[in-house]
Structures are given as C-alpha cells and as structure tokens.
Image: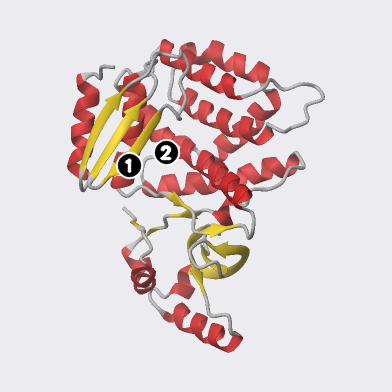
C-alpha cells in the first residue's frame, strides 16, 4: 500500500508535534467501502504505529487519523471517560462508544474541510463512505422497532458533516439516497447538525460548543422517540476551554459540583463531577470522603481553590482560550 507525498508530508508535520515518533503502515485489500474503523494505532514505548487496514482510500484514511492527532496535540478539546455504571461494564462500554460517536462529527467539521482542500474527497471516496454507512445500517420501515435508531442518527450526523463541506452537485444523489433509506434518522441528525453550527467550528471554543450541542440535541431526539437518554453531558468529560482570567477565579465561580449516579472509574467510589455553569458540561470528575462532615469540609475547601490550583492538583487537562 502506497501513500502520497502529501500524506507523508502531513506525517512529518505531526511528528514535529508528537513527543515520540510516529510511523505509518498499510496492509490489506480494497473492500470498496470506507469507515473510521479501517485504521489502528499501537503505542510501543515512545513510538506510535498507525496501520491502515483497507486499501480502498489509504490517503483519505491515513490523513484523517493524522489530522485527528494534530488537533489533539494542538489543544483542541478531547473527550475522555472517568465514570462507569455500577456493576454493568457492557452498558459503560456502550455509553463510551456512543459518546465518542457524538464527539467525532464536531472534529470532522475541521478534518473533512482540510481533506477537501487537498483533493482527498473524490467521488470514489464519497461513494465508499456512503457504502460504509449503509453497510452498518438497516433501512427504516413503517413498523421500525428502533433498535438501530441511535446508531442511524450518529452515522448520518457524521455523513451530514461530510456533505456540508462538499459541493451540492457532488453530494445530491448520495444525500437523496440516504434520506430515502433513513428518513426519520436523517431528520433527527439534521436537528443535531443545526444546533452544532459546523460553520463556526474554527477553534477550540467553537469545537467545545459544538460537542455540547451534539450531546444536548441527541438526547432531545432520543426523548422524542421515547428511547433511553445517553446523558453524555454528565457521563463524558470534555476538556474545558478557559481564559487566563477564568483560571484565576475560584472553582465556585466557574463550576458547580454535582453528584451523579455513577462511580469514579479509578476509585470505584461515588462520583462527583464539575460542570461548567455556562453549559452544564462535565469538565472533571472527583471522589470525595464518604463521611459526611469530612465531605462537607472537602467541598468547602475545593470551592475556594482557584481553577488552576484545582486542575494542577487533579492533573486535569484544559485548553487555554484564544
């Protein structure tokens, strides 16, 4: 499997940011479909190996992964998981996967735009991408039992983000195809896309706002369908984007501490999350003493710390606002 000079140039750029070394390999045949599972990453000491496992569109797939890494290394908010459902690892894993699927489209608003500018989203790539979506989903029916409702919405949301950066002439046929196969999910995904405002995702703060909007609006769509809510705003920790001034303020000026019916993934204790007063998004998770008097004193002291002091103590990543 060969990679283009542009792909190798991007690999060099990411290597300049990465604290170790990144190598890129490719293997496998061309399936004719494209999805985001066709690349794997393995860390071996200070070396990171990226493996493209399908030859359908190696440059599209490789640059997609490299741009993900570049945005992460550049301080764009990331989603991570510090909480778990008590005695239910399967549900925890399902919530992690769903939250990740909802986070990605906001990043892809930047990534797909960059890939388009480099001529990487050809008609063949578009066709392979849509085949990948359709390979995962069953068409909606008049008596649909909705077992795939959430997955359809999440995959079609990503497709709509891709379509949003392309010319109408290029996407018209494929857009109609997906709308005809999945009309209910397409409409729900459109609501989420509108709330995300992908055209405003140009920096870390814009990305953060779009992810929170996706989390919020997805649950609104689940409620309309009378399906279980994900509650990703509580479950998933999203890197906060803060100004220098906000870092100097006390914790109680920026965050509310909230008890959740989940466990701290590390300590297995009852979990508390810090949610931003502005949007209610989980920005960090902590455990507190179980004894009531000690717990009250713990939170009293915590609220009076500056945000930067707290984040230093709990080693919480954050992004400095532009």
Q: From the top left corner, tell me how far across and down residue 106 is, in percent.
A: 46, 39
Could you say which quadrant of the image residue 321 lies in?
bottom left
Q: Secondary structure at mark 1?
A: helix
Q: Which mark is residue 71?
A: 1
Marks 2 and 1 sit apart, C-alpha to C-alpha, by 8 Å
Q: Residue furthest right?
A: 143
**Residue at horizontal 39%, vertical 20%?**
54
Q: How many callouts does the rendering have?
A: 2
Residue position marked by numbered label 2 in the rendering: 107
Contact between labelled residues 1 and 2, with CB atoms less than 8 Å apart: yes
The image shows residue 7, relative to residue 79, as above or below, that is above
Q: Is residue 114 visible?
A: no
**Residue at horizontal 60%, vertical 85%?**
292
Q: Secondary structure at mark 2?
A: helix
Looking at this view, is 124 or 191 the one in front?
124
Q: From the top left corner, tell me how far across and down residue 266 is, in percent.
A: 48, 64
Q: Which mark is residue 155?
A: none
């Amino acid at each position: 499997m060969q990679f283009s000079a542009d792909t190798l140039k991007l690999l060099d750029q990411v290597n300049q940011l990465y604290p170790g070394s990144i190598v890129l390999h490719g293997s496998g045949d061309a399936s004719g479909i494209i999805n985001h599972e066709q690349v794997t990453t393995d860390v071996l000491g200070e070396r990171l190996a990226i493996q493209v496992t399908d030859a359908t569109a190696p440059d599209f797939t490789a640059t997609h992964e490299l741009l993900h890494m570049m945005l992460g290394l550049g301080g764009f908010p990331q989603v991570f998981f510090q909480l778990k459902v008590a005695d239910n690892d399967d549900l925890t894993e399902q919530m992690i996967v769903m939250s990740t699927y909802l986070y990605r489209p906001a990043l892809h608003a930047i990534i797909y735009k960059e890939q388009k500018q480099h001529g990487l989203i050809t008609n063949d790539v578009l066709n392979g991408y849509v085949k990948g979506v359709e390979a995962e989903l069953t068409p909606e029916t008049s008596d649909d039992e909705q077992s795939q409702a959430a997955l359809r919405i999440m995959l079609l949301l990503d497709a709509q983000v891709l379509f949003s950066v392309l010319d109408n002439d290029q996407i018209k046929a494929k857009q109609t195809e997906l709308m005809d196969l999945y009309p209910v999910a397409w409409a729900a995904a459109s609501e989420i896309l509108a709330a995300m405002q992908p055209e405003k995702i140009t920096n870390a703060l814009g990305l953060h706002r779009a992810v929170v909007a996706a989390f919020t609006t997805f649950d609104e769509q689940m409620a309309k369908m009378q399906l279980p809510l994900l509650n990703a705003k509580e479950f998933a920790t999203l890197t906060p984007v803060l100004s220098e001034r906000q870092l100097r303020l006390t914790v109680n000026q920026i965050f509310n501490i909230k008890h959740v019916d989940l466990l701290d993934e590390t300590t297995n204790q009852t979990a508390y999350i810090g949610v931003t007063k502005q949007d209610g998004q989980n920005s960090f998770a902590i455990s507190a003493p179980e004894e009531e008097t000690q717990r009250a004193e713990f939170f009293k002291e915590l609220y009076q710390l500056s945000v930067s002091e707290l984040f230093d103590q709990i080693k919480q990543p954050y992004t400095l606002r532009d």
